[in-house]
Image (tube, coloured by chain):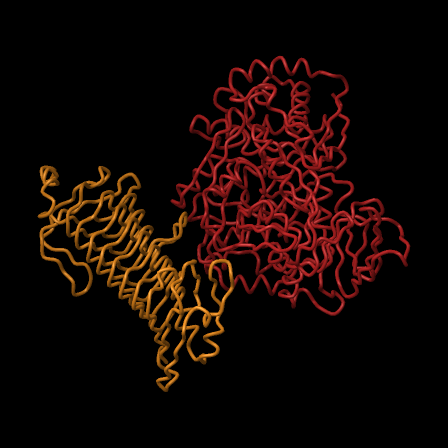
Chain colours: A orange, B red
């Protein structure tokens, strides 16, 4: 089953539409999908009031549902929240809390995504071909239950606190990252291909952060462990370049590993005398 | 206004009514002999249970600590939201609900009186502001006095009468209800980064032991004739092996009891009933405590039942909260209140699969079921420390049904299951006993004469639950019990129907109760001279700004008491 959604207008108010979820759409008719509940500002709306819905039945019910959103939904929040299977493809920008607490399936965005994408996710994949906002894969403010599984791939840049409180899973960022990458991280892997702002791995206890570009400074609560010739990001992705390996955050008695590429960071060379 | 509740199965243990079908008449907010049958509004309660409104002897619902908990945990709120209705205000909160939500949620379950058990005297104004803001339920608060410098000095010097006068002043100044001791002596030691290990350890710089503090304040309590006994959170709380401390605490006031009346209340006893040397050898000490309580009558307890959920622990026991923080590694905050007390807050998740947490769950129920006399053990979760109060219906189901206990036992840590005493306990409480542990016993322990019963003259606080004890067996239909207690069919507060079918119909103000102690002779000047000087030296507020005046309370309800000093 394949569902096409076209926004009927340019949304001016925040829309909360956690019903845009392949598990919920699965097996429903056009009418039923249009009748699903969503909020626009403080008004309760039907999904059909906000989107033009097209349903293409591909025959078998066994097949996973695919939702295609065509157009700008940057004001639409919680798309694909808690989804377990199926696929969402967004051709345009997407709003906050995309794939929040996602458990399976795949979300692909050909555009930018606002904050909290993949927040607290437990499984599945999110791939973003543009940039993402702050709190990528991080829990809601105050919560300590971060990402527990799954995979996030961002081809552009990300904002601050990507992967905060992360426990398991992998985040790959092929652009630059903001401050506090892997803040209070407890496990899993974060890979930043390009530059990274300061305070990477602050308060991390365990897990791996790999920075391929320049970082202004490494937190003073990290200690240098050695030089590594290559680093494995995941199965089949190994980066062959010299990396400094730091261990921290010592203020939290942490054993997290922070790899920083040697070449773009000549200002860190003074650490070598401690080896 | 007149109201007549017809044909309900009435459970009123204080008056010995056990499930009899009878009518309850209400006039002007009180229960009366009879009303004009034609004029009165009638409620048909046939096939339903009628009980006095629920009472909670120990629930942290207001004050600086609770508010700090709300600030610490935005994540506690965002998933639990109450929308506004025509009569209720919106609110948030799961384990630390906002004041309005607290009032509505208690009322929905049929609870009408709640005691906040830990008020730092310096923060009495804040506590009363929040209590005044909590709708529907009646409330009161216990000032924390066990580690207050004046108390430590008076008791060290053996000046029991002076101490009693000082306590009388404190209770009046803070508009408090009972004497609360938290980790007596330990909090003062915590000011120096230490703690006390047993009730015979010295408190640094004061030359006094927890035993002397407990005994001293127990004597003070008797001199002042306060309605409730001293309310004690024992030393070494939350540490393996602490059941010995709990037993010693109960034993140390044994000789102060006369004519079998309780002189001490051990609160959230589950947290004080741990056996073992460390967390690996951790075991239940419920049997030992129950054996002691079964043969002594000078003590009442409450459960402090653990619920498997995410919650926020908060106590005035700063050193314990620090230990909990080091155990859990979670975020935390603590707070030392100028020479008075200290508190801490740590978010906590009780997990079924954790051996320690599952054993704690078992201990609470073991205590409640092994202690034979239900008047001695009252139901609480120490909200929110063991779990939020909205879990009461689940505890009632566990107490009433072996099947319900077994259903949970199946899901807990296997090692905890094999060591739990619960499979060997057949006891199932009936509705009469449930009415004791949730209402009558609580009212009796608190010395609330007009609450917890349905006799003539009592406050018309009544809960009606849709469960027919004649046709349904609570031990088999425990889910129906849970449903019934979750949403009271009617909650009547002061003669007014405030809840119908679990929906709040009306906003009424509950009263704030406090004890107005009348001393034999005026002695305030003597107390004040000393106090004024010390306030200048140690407090950040002026003495004149310290007491809570009566007009500060939304609805003040002083309870007059004549003291012996």
Left of A12 or right of it: where is A263?
left
Residue B403 location, x and y as percent? 60, 65
Left of A261 or right of it: where is B327?
right
Q: Quadrant of the C terminus of chain B?
A: top right
Task: State the residue in front, B508 or B147.
Answer: B508
Left of B336 or right of it: where is B129?
right
Residue B270 location, x and y as percent? 56, 46
Left of B62 or right of it: where is A205?
left
Which residue in the rendered view is the most extreme toward the bottom?
Answer: A59
Task: State the residue in front, B478 or A165.
Answer: A165
Residue B49 location, x and y as percent? 75, 60
Q: Please tell me in which quadrant of the rendered image residue A250 appears.
A: top left
Evaluate whether residue B245 shows in this view: yes
Residue under the image location 70 percent in, 67 percent down: B473
Residue under the image location 16 percent in, 58 percent down: A232
Residue B343 location, x and y as percent? 50, 35
């Amino acid at each position: 089953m394949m569902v096409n959604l076209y926004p009927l207008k340019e949304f001016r108010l925040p829309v909360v539409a956690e019903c845009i979820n392949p598990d919920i759409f699965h097996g429903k008719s056009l009418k039923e999908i249009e009748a699903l509940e969503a909020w626009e500002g403080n008004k309760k709306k039907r999904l059909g009031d906000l989107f033009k819905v097209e349903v293409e039945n591909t025959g078998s019910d066994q097949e996973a549902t695919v939702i295609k959103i065509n157009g700008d939904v940057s004001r639409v929040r919680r798309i694909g929240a808690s989804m377990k299977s199926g696929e969402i493809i967004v051709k345009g920008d997407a709003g906050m809390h995309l794939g929040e607490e996602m458990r399976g399936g795949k979300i692909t965005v050909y555009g930018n995504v606002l904050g909290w994408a993949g927040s607290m996710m437990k499984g599945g994949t999110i791939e973003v071909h543009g940039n993402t906002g702050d709190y990528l894969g991080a829990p809601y403010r105050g919560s300590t239950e971060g990402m527990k599984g799954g995979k996030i791939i961002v081809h552009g840049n990300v904002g601050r606190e990507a992967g905060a409180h992360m426990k398991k899973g992998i985040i790959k960022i092929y652009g630059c990252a903001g401050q506090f990458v892997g803040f209070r991280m407890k496990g899993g892997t974060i890979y930043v291909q390009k530059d990274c702002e300061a305070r990477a791995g602050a308060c991390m206890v365990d897990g791996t952060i790999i920075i391929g570009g320049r970082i202004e400074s490494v937190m003073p609560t990290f200690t240098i462990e050695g030089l590594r010739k290559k680093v494995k990001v995941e199965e089949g992705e190994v980066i062959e370049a010299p990396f400094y390996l730091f261990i921290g955050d010592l203020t939290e008695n942490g054993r997290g590993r922070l790899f920083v590429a040697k070449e773009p960071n000549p200002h860190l060379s003074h650490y070598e005398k401690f080896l | 206004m007149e109201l007549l509740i017809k044909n309900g199965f009435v459970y009123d243990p204080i008056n010995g009514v056990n499930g009899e079908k009878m009518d309850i008449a209400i006039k002007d907010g009180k229960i009366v002999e009879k009303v004009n049958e034609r004029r009165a509004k009638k409620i048909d309660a046939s096939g339903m249970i009628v009980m006095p409104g629920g009472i909670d002897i120990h629930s942290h619902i207001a004050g600086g600590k609770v508010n700090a908990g709300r600030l610490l945990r935005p994540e506690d709120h965002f998933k639990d939201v109450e929308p506004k209705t025509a009569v209720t205000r919106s609110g948030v909160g799961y384990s630390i609900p906002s004041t309005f939500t607290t009032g509505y949620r208690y009322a929905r379950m049929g609870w009408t009186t709640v005691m906040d058990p830990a008020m730092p005297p310096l923060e009495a104004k804040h506590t009363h502001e929040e209590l005044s803001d909590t709708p529907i339920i009646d409330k009161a608060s216990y000032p924390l006095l066990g580690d207050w410098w004046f108390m430590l000095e008076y008791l060290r010097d053996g000046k029991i009468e002076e101490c009693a006068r000082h306590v009388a002043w404190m209770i009046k100044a803070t508009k408090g209800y009972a004497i609360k001791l938290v980790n007596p002596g330990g909090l003062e030691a915590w000011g120096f980064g230490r703690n006390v290990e047993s009730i015979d350890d010295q408190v640094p710089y004061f030359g006094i032991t927890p035993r002397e503090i407990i005994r001293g304040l127990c004597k003070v309590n008797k001199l002042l004739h306060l309605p409730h006994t001293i309310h004690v959170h024992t030393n070494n709380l939350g540490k393996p092996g602490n059941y010995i401390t709990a037993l010693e605490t109960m034993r140390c006031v044994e000789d102060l009891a006369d004519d079998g009346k309780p002189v001490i209340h051990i609160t959230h006893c589950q947290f004080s009933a741990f056996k073992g040397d460390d967390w690996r050898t951790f075991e239940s000490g419920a049997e030992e405590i129950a054996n002691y309580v079964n043969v002594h009558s000078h003590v009442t307890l409450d459960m402090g039942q653990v619920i498997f959920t995410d919650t926020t622990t908060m106590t005035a026991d700063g050193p314990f909260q620090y230990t909990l923080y080091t155990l859990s590694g979670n975020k935390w905050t603590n707070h030392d209140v100028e020479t008075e007390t200290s508190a801490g807050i740590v978010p906590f998740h009780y997990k079924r699969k954790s051996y320690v947490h599952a054993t704690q769950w078992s201990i609470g129920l073991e205590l409640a079921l092994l202690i034979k006399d239900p008047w001695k053990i009252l139901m609480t979760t120490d909200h929110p420390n063991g779990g939020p109060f909205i879990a009461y219906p689940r505890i009632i189901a566990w107490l009433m049904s072996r099947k319900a206990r077994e259903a949970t036992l199946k899901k807990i840590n296997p090692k905890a299951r094999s060591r739990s005493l619960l499979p060997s306990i057949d006891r199932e409480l009936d509705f009469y006993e449930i009415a004791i542990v949730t209402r009558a016993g609580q009212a009796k322990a608190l010395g609330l004469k007009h609450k917890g019963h349905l006799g003539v003259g009592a406050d018309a606080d009544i809960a009606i639950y849709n469960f027919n004890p004649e046709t349904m067996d609570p031990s088999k239909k425990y889910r129906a019990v849970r449903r019934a207690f979750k949403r009271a069919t009617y909650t009547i507060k002061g003669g007014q129907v405030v809840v119908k079918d679990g929906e709040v119909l009306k906003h009424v103000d509950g009263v704030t109760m406090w004890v107005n102690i009348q001393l034999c002779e005026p002695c305030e000047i003597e107390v004040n001279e000393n106090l004024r000087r010390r306030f200048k030296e140690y407090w950040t507020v002026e003495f004149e700004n310290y007491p809570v005046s009566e007009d500060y309370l939304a609805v003040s309800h002083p309870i007059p008491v004549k003291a012996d000093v």
